[in-house]
Image (cartoon, rainbow, N blue to C red):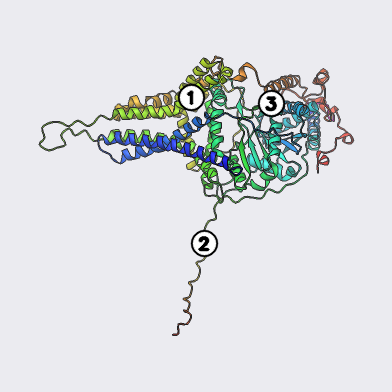
Amino acid sequence: MMLKQHLTVLAEIDTLVGDLGALPDAPLAMPRQRLEPALIDRRAPALPPVAPQATPGAET
Amino acid sequence: MPPGLGAALAVARARVAALAISVTAAAVAFQLFMKFGAADGLDNLDLTRAGLILISTWWLAWGAAQGLMGLTTRAAPPRVKAPPHQGRAIVLVPVYNEDPMVTFARIAAMEASLQAARAARGGAEVHFAILSDTRNTEIAALEQIWFLRLLAETGARGRIFYRRRTDNTGKKAGNIEEFITRSGAAYDYAVILDADSLMEGETILEMLARMEAEPRLGLLQTLPKVVRAQTLFGRAMQFSAAFYSPVFARGLAMMQGRSGPFWGHNAAVRVRAFAESCGLPALAGKPPFGGHILSHDYVEAALLARAGWTVRLDDDLEGSFEEGPENIVDHAKRDRRWCQGNLQHARLLAAPRLKLWSRFVFVQGIFAYVAPLFWLGFILVSIVATVTAPPPDYFPTPYWPFPVFPADETSKAIGLFIGIIGLLILPKALIAFDAAASGRAAGFGGGLRAALSTLSELVLSSITAPVFLMYQTRAVLQVLMGRDGGWPTNNRGDGTLSLRTALVAGRWISAWGLAGGAATWIWAPGLVPWLSPVVVPMVLAPLILWATARPWRGRLFTTPFDRRAPAIVAAHDAVLTRWEGLAAQGAVLPPLGTQTAAVPVQQEDADAPARGISDTGAPGPEASQNRHDPADAPRPAEETHG
C-alpha cells in the first residue's frame, strides 16, 4: 500500500514538473559546423589519362 | 586612424612583445645549455636535452610574459555605461548527478539577486532553465522535488524551467544544444553556468547590457573567482585565483583581441550567434580523439570568432564565482578530462577558416598537458647522459706531458637553473609587489601577509609540482594509448582525504619516485642533489595528497571573501541553511499545486512533517493526500512564449 502511494506521488510530481518546468517551444536551428579539413578520398578511382591534344594547325 | 585599427595594433604589439620575451628567454636557455654540454664535447643526448630545454623554457616564459603584460594595465569597465538590456534572456544551469538541494539553492539565491538588481537598475526579465543530464534516477527524483520547492519559494512559475534529457548525447555541449534547438528562438541572450557557479544579479544584468550595446559581441566571458575552499590545497587555489589570476587574465585580454576565451561557464552568449556558429560535429573515429568534442568551450569560442563574432573576456566584471576541487585527487580527475579534451583539439588545428589566434589557443591547450612530458624527458635523458658520459680525457694530445682539465661549466648550469626558477617566481613576486604598492593587498590581509601567502603558495606548488607532473604524464599517456576517461561526476564534498584513500591514489607515484631515486643513486649519484626536489615529493606523494586535503584554518591564503562573504554567497548560504532544515524535517515537498506563488517558509514548516519528504529525499507517505487537481494546474510554460 505504501509503495503504491509512493508511486502515485512520484507520478503526480512527474506530471506537475512536466507542466510547470516545460521549456518554451521555440526551436532554433543549430547547423553542424565543418571542423576537420576535407580529406582526399584515396578510394576514388584515378582519373583516366588525358589524351594528348593535337596542336592546332599541326598537320600530320 | 580608422576605428578599430588602434585596438588591432595594440593587440599586435602585445602579441609581438610576449613572443619576443618568450623566444629570447628560450634562446638564452638553449645557448647556456649548449655551452654547458660542450664542456666535454657535444653529443646527441646534449642536443636532445638542449631542444627539450628550448621548448620547455619557451612555454614557461610565455606564461611569465602573460603575467608581466597583465601588470602593465588595469582592468577597466567600458567607457560608456550600457543602458539596461531589453532583450529576452535566460540563465542556463546544466546539471549532471549534482546534489539538487545545493544546486537549486544557488538558483534561488541568484533569482532573488536578479530581482533586486532589476528593481534598482531596470532591464528585462531573466529566466532560468535547469538542464538536467542526470543519469541517477534517485537524484533525478530529488531534482523534481527540489524544483517544486524552488518554484514554491520564488513564485517563479514561467520564469524557472526544468527539463531532463532522456539521453545525454554530446554531454554538456549536447545539453546546451538541445536547449537551443528546442527553445533558443525564445531568447536573445543566454548566460551559461556550471552547477557550482554563482553570479550576482547585478553582474548578470551588466553582462546582458554590454551584449546588447555591442551587436557584434557573440560571447562575453567573466573571470570567476573560487569560493568556499576549506582545505589547504583548496585555499591555496582560491588565493591564486583571487590574487594572481586577474593579472594573468589581464595579460590574456591584451593579447586575445576579438578572439577571446570561453571557459564553458559564467559567460553570456548571443543565442542567434551561438546557434548559427557552434553546432559541433562528432569527429570521425572513437574517443579519445574521435567522437563528441569533449572540451567544447575552446572550440565554440573559435567558431564564433571564425564567423566574425567578437568573443571577449571582461576581467573588470566582479560578482562571478565558482567552486574548485578541494584536493589534488579531485583536481587530477578533472584534469584527466581536460587533458583528453585538449589533446583532442589536435584534430582541429587545421580546421578551415579558423583565426590564427584560435589555432594558437588550441596549441597552448595541448602544450599545457604535454609540457610536463618535456621536463620528464629532460630528467630521463640527463640520467642517461650521465651514465653514458665517457670518462674525461686529461691527455688529449699525444706525447704532451701536462694534463688538460675540461672547462668547468657548472656555473652555466646553475645560471640556467636559477633562470628557469626565476621564470616561475618572478611574475608572482611582481604581482605581490604590485598588490602591496597599489593597495590591492589590503583585501588579502595586508602587504606582509599577501607576501607570505605568495611565498607559501610558491613553496606549496614546488612541493606538489612533481605529483602533478606524474598525474599529467599518466593522463597524456592514457589518451595517447587510446583510453577514454569518460565523464565522471564531480565530487563536491568537504574535500578531505583519508590516509588510506591518499595511499591508494598516490602509491604508484611513490613507487616511481623510489625506482627513479634508486636508479639515480646507483648510476648517476652526481645528479642526486639536482633531482631530489623532484624525487622526494614523489616518494612522499600519499602524504602530500593527505596533508594538502586537510582543513586549513591558518591565516595565510586570506582572500577578500574571508573578511566579508560576497552577497550572493551569503544569500546561497541562507537558502541552503533553510532548506537543510526542511530536509531534516522531511518537509521539502510543498503542497502540490501551490507553485504559482511564493509560499511563506514558516507556514510551510508548521505542518511540514506530515506531507514532506524523508531525510533520504523519498516522499513521505502522506504526500499523496495532497491531491493535485489538473484543473488547477498552471498553464504550461509554452503558452507564455511564442
Q: Amino acid at mark 2?
A: Arg
The x and y percentages for residue B4 are 60, 42
Q: Main secondary structure of the magenta part?
A: loop
**Amino acid type indicated by mark 3:** Val
Q: Which residues are magenta?
A: B589-593
Verify CB contact (< 8 Å) between mark 1 and mark 2.
no
The numbered mark at residue B430 is: 1
Disc 2 is attached to a residue of which chain?
Answer: A
Q: Position of residue B172 (x, y in %)?
A: 64, 39
Closest to the observer: B61 or B210? B210
Q: Quadrant of residue B441?
A: top right
Q: Residue at x 52, y 26 (%)?
A: B328
**Residue B388 position in % (x across, y down):** 27, 36
Label 1 lies in what chain?
Answer: B
Tell me residue B243's x, y (percent).
Answer: 55, 24
Is residue A45 on the magenta stretch? no
According to the picture, the residue beneath numbered tag 3 turns out to be B102
- Disc 3 secondary structure class: helix
User: Which circle marks residue B635 in the picture?
Assistant: none
The residue to which callout 2 is attached is: A43
Q: Secondary structure at mark 1?
A: helix
